[in-house]
Amino acid sequence: MFSLKSALAIPFAKYVYKKTQKWANTPIKTQEKVFKSLIEQATNTVFGKDHNFQNITSHAEFIERVPVRDYEALKPYVERVVAGESDILWKGKPTYFAKTSGTTSGSKYIPITKESMPTHVEAARNAILMYIHETGNSKFVNGKMIFLQGSPILKEQNGVQLGRLSGIVAHYVPKYLQKNRLPSWETNCIEDWETKVDAIVEETLPENMTVISGIPSWVQMYFEKLQQKTGKKVGDIFKNFNLFIFGGVNYEPYRAKFENLIGRKVDSIELYPASEGFFAFQDKQDQKGMLLQLNSGIFYEFIKADEFFNENPKRITIANVELNVNYVMIISTNAGLWAYNIGDTVQFTSTKPYRVIVSGRIKHFISAFGEHVIGKEVEQAMQDAVAGTNIRITEFTVAPQINPKAGLPYHEWFIEFENEPDDMVTLAEKIDQSLQKQNSYYFDLIEGKVLQPLKITKIKKDGFQEHMKSLGKLGGQNKIPRLSNDRKIADKLSTLKV
């Protein structure tokens, strides 16, 4: 059936592709331009004056005057912005505060300005248009689309709107997509996550769903509820569903389970959005990594993860990054974040153009014995171990067991299975072998009899959801850390084991 909307999407996608290629092909120049613009626009702010922005003409001078800060260190400035003062971190007042749950700082208030807000919206739109340009598939724009997100209800604080990022973005859905968008405003405003997902199931069941998006762990909950209600695979319920858009966590550990729930393969687009900025999106179906958004009012710096806790770690720009090195990503933005550590680690998969994967969190690692195992490694180990089997994982996390009742210490893997292995010992061996191959420190500790190979602890069905619910973090943008260097999560999960 002919549709003007899907027909118009093709030339628009071509236009966006050409525009993107222009800056992606001149990356260093693009970033230099962004850097210069940011410094100029913030010269007369309180932060700009405190750090002598008027005399900054180079990255080296910026490093000299502006130290790397996390939220705690930037908080004195943020608190002045929250109190209603103008021209503190960025000119004027922000349009919004994105409220996030900080692990160390309680609630964080991340400013979003009139200059930064459009970049969030454009990047999400461009991710879809780049997919249309590459595949020629634009039929899905005629169907219904859903994004599992937080409530769009905003509060006001000293003249600035306050809410969750996904709720703020909900106010910016283009008019031409409003009719296609689900859930309804009323359903989106439901605070209790389980009630909300039940309502979304009811609303979407009779519809022609073509695009579904959200954090994989919560989309999985939605798919399971659909299946429980109908007894059908999601792909049979929604015959035209052919595009899954996700962000927030690595999809690979969930892929086998999703394909089983859907009943067939569907194309997927990975996004890298955060309250602090929309950093990257998957621009090619056949390439690993996401295109770093170099033209979105964000200036990027990188510090090697294994040097990050040194006294004066080296800060570099994209001009000097290397492939497959674990970097802490530092950002300066047109929302007034300066040399800001968002806590993520990334690795470059390509420098022509610049593409990244998220490898983990600088605070989320296991190095109880000097092994420095990161999120990417445990996810890869799990992927390697279940490849070619019918084992399906619902969720997992890893923690060190330093004081076992008997024997050497080990890494404890807490796993909730949808389809468990016949032989748990073999699965544990496969995971352990993959981890040893990837991480030479871990290999040495096993070889040197400092650690014994990992052990699996089975978690009961819906145990991870139960755990998140007990923390008041069920749904939305919340996700369980893939690994941690202490037993806080592990001890709570131990009460939910099979």
Image: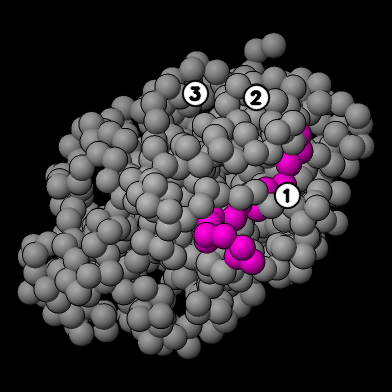
The kind of residue tagged 1 is: Lys
How many residues crowd around disc 3 within 10 Å: few (fewer than 14), some, or many (20 or more)? many
Magenta highlight range: 404-419
Is residue 343 in view from this perspective?
A: yes
Q: CA distance from mark 3 to mark 1?
A: 42 Å
Specify the amino acid type for callout 3: Ile
Between marks 2 and 3, how big is the CA–CA gap? 33 Å
Residue 93 appears at what percent x and percent y? 41, 76
Q: Residue at the location (35% across, 41% down)?
A: 356
First in sequence: mark 2 vs mark 1: 2
Label 3 element class: helix
Disc 2, SS = loop
- Identify the residue shown where x is 28% and y is 30%: 21
Residue identifier under label 3? 132
Q: Is residue 218 left or right of residue 101?
A: right
Does the magenta-highlighted stretch encompass residue 278?
no
Q: Percent x, y for residue 289? A: 39, 35
Instruction: Choose mark 3 or mark 1, whichever is in front.
Output: 1
Number of residues whose C-alpha sits closer than 10 Å to that of mark 2, classed few (under 14), some (14–19) or many (20 or more)? few
Is residue 335 shown above or below 382?
A: below
Q: CA distance from mark 2 to mark 1?
A: 18 Å
Answer above or below: position of 378 versus 329.
Answer: above
For disc 2, the marked residue is: 389
Q: Quadrant of the N terminus?
A: top right
Q: Position of residue 200 (x, y in %)?
A: 81, 46
Q: Which mark is residue 458?
A: 1
Position in image of residue 83 (x %, y %):
48, 88
